[in-house]
Structure formats: C-alpha cells, structure tokens
Image (cartoon, grey):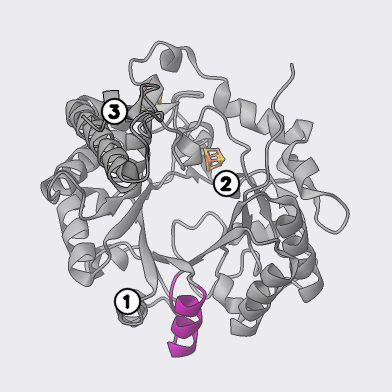
Amino acid sequence: MHLPSKHLNSILVKPAGPDCNMVCTYCFYLKKANLFPDARIHRMTEVILEETIRQVMTQSGERVSFGWQGGEPTLMGLPFFENVVEFQKRYGHGQSTGNGLQTNGILIDKNWTKFLRDYKFLVGLSIDGPEHIHNRYRFMRNGQGSWSRVIDRAKLLLDADVAVNALTVVNNYSVRFPQEIYDFHKNLGLKYMQFIPCVELEPKDPTQAAPFSAPSKEYGKFLCKLFDLWLADFINNKPTTSVRFFDSVFFHYVDMEPPECTLLPACGVYVVVEYNGDVYSCDFFVEPEWKLGNIMEGNLTEMLNSDLQYSFGLMKATLPTVCKNCRWLRYCLGGCTKNRTRNPQEGSINKFCKSYKMFFEHADSSLRDLAQKWRRQQILEEQKAISQYTEERRIKVGRNEPCPCGSGLKFKKCCSK
Ligand code: SF4
Ligand code: SF4
C-alpha cells in the first residue's frame, strides 16, 4: 500500500527522561526508568539537544512545534532551555516555531516566568483542581500534597502574563467534581483547560484497571456536565473558556482536521525523543517494541515515515467492528490507542467508549448548532472583506473593467450599480 509521506512538524522531547521531583500515584512515566538501567539520573546532553533541534529545524516546514515533557523537564534548569531557543534560532530557516512546556510547576520562579513569557512558551501546568482533589494523588517526594506550591506557581505564571493551560487528570475521585474543578480553574484565571481521563492497568492483575482509573460511565457524566458549563459561558456565540476536547471535536463539526491526534484516523503523526536520543512512536508507547532509532544515528523524517511508525499508526486505524458501525465514528475516530490497549475488559474497544457515546448523545445538537452559526459568521466575514476591498478599489476601477469582486462582469454592471 502506498502511503503519503508525513512532514515533521511536531516533536515531543523528554530532556530529563522519567525523572521527576514528585511521585504522583497515577504517573505512568516514572517506571520508564527501567528502560535505562545504566543511568540513575537521566539528563539530555548538549550534543543530543543540538542534534535534535538541528534535525527538526532543518527538516520541518513553515511551522513546527516542540513539546518539552517528562518526567519533569524543568529539572534540566533554565540554561538548558536558553540553549533550546539559541539552537532553534541557529538552525531555523524563518519558520514559525512554537514551544510548549509541560510541568508540575514546582521549580518555577521569577527567572523562569520571565524566560517563558519572553520566548512565548505555552505552559501546560499539571493541576487537578481544589486542594482535596489535587492532593488526592499528586504528592511531593516526602509524601506531602503539592497543591499549595502549585497554586503559588500558577499565580506567578499568570501574574507574569505567561500563557498557561491547565492539564487536569480525571481520576476515580475527581470525576465526581466537574463543576468544582471547572469553577476553580476559571476563578484562578486558568481559561485554557485540558482534561485527561486516567486509565492504567493494575500491575498485579492486568485484567483489571488500576483503582485510580476513571470509570467510563462517570467520565461520560463528567464530560456532559463540563460541556454544559463551557456552553453556559459563551458570549455572543463565542466561548470564553477553552476546553481542548470540545475545541478539537468542533473541528470535525466544521469539516476541518482537528489538532489532536486522538481525533485523527491514524496515530504516528509525531515522534518522541528521550533524554539519550532514543526515538519512540508516542508518549504512551515509549517501549522497546516502538523504538524507531536514535537521533545520533538516524534521520527523524525517515523515522517518522518508517514501516514501524506506519504500523504503529495503523493500530488506531484498524477499528473494532463496534466502532465501524458506530454513528459517532466520524467525530470520535475510536479515540486514543492508549485507551484501547489499556482496556482490560473489552479487547480493543476504547476504555472510554461509553463516555464518548454519552457525550455525543448529549452534545451533538448543540455542536451542530454552533457549527451552523460558525459557518454563517464565516460567510458574513468573507462578504464584509469583499465589500471593503471593492469599496477601496471603487475609485480606481474603470466602469468597463472587470469587477474586482471576481464575478466576471464589467464593474458598471456589477458592484458599481
Ligand atoms: S496513542 Fe493516543 S496519544 Fe499516542 S499518537 Fe495515538 S492517539 Fe495520539
Ligand atoms: S463512541 Fe465508542 S464505538 Fe463509537 S467510535 Fe467512539 S469508541 Fe468507537
């Protein structure tokens, strides 16, 4: 089968590997240290960083985005990120370059906020909501809850005008509090929100989901309530908060490609670079089976287009029968492959299938309505732009010349009437 070649326009880098200054109960990445048994501490060298950025900047097109994740990427210290922007400048060819930093916030101080604002980093701050929710599973290494520190850092970031997106894990406890979490984020000034449903397999019994995983039905109710809250905050048909899942689903309703890989037909659109330069298929599949190569020995675009990465992508594209026959497939696309492989009960069906069905039943007519209004608005704006253009040209166009509106008629027979 001939598959179109993919462009390298998005990459995720884990400069401190799985190392973190916190120990959250539900974290799936801490145990990745087992992949690198020869090193106790994992830090990307300047040589690997430079080669990663050189490859990305020389191989990407007009736009490129870097996601800096972990573990905890701020463990690398600010000078590492000063090198990041320096190398991006050195190897770039004028393309628009975005940086996103996913952090627990603990190490953020005024030097960081100045840097993040000056270089327009988008910060994804891990924060699960009010104290009783956040401290349920998000612990410092000494066992204390991390909430008060994270709140301080959130305020520091927002006061410094850094763009912040709340990254909120929805687990078996927090799933009961959609309104409390939404209002909490909003009142803190976090208008951009991303909710990630938690599911891991129980290590001692992989036929069961780990107890902190969000149950599917409850997560469905969570999404429905959240949707109502998001919708209630619209002013003049425009949202005043951003909930990433709703924003992304909306793309499908207006026949555009959503930015989120979970809503695309196949995976494999980006790659992950670990601290030692190893390259993997996806953040959730940093596993020996899905290792594509090493940055010091191979070419990133070739790895992105390798047979292994295509077969990874096909896991999502190969849908179970229930999805093929589902009326919501066009919007849901079967969801994230991770949530299909970590579903102990139902083979390759998404663990949150029930949640998505509940959500689409609930939100479909409102989303259609919003899409219709959006399309009308687009037409109005286009018409306005044309008449403004025509008005500006009116005095410059001769009566017998073609009309600038593009109708093909003479100006005197068209817009000059
Ligand atoms: S497994 Fe999930 S997160 Fe990874 S590329 Fe596929 S849809 Fe995206
Ligand atoms: S709602 Fe369920 S069955 Fe339908 S496409 Fe999504 S995961 Fe598949």
Kindly state the secondary structure of the residue where label 1 is placed.
Answer: helix
Rendering coords of residue 379 (x, y %): 27, 33
Rendering coords of residue 268 (x, y %): 63, 37
Rendering coords of residue 180 (x, y %): 16, 58
What is the spatial separation of the Cα atoms under label 2 and label 3, in whole angstroms? Answer: 63 Å
Q: Is residue 121 left or right of residue 297?
A: left
Say above or below: 189 vs 313: below
Instruction: Return the residue at label 1.
Output: 158
Rendering coords of residue 161 (x, y %): 35, 77
**Which numbered disc, 2 or 1, marks the residue closer to the eye?**
1
Which region is colored magenta?
104-119
> Which residue lies most toward the bottom here?
110
What is the spatial separation of the Cα atoms under label 1 and label 3, in whole angstroms? Answer: 56 Å
- Tell whether position 106 is magenta: yes
Q: Is residue 280 left or right of residue 182?
A: right
Instruction: Return the residue at label 3.
Output: 412
Instruction: Return the residue at label 2.
Output: 284
Is the residue at mark 2 in contact range of ligand 1, meaning its CB lies under 8 Å from it? Answer: yes
Q: Can residue 108 be seen in this snapshot?
A: no
Q: Quadrant of residue 375?
A: top left
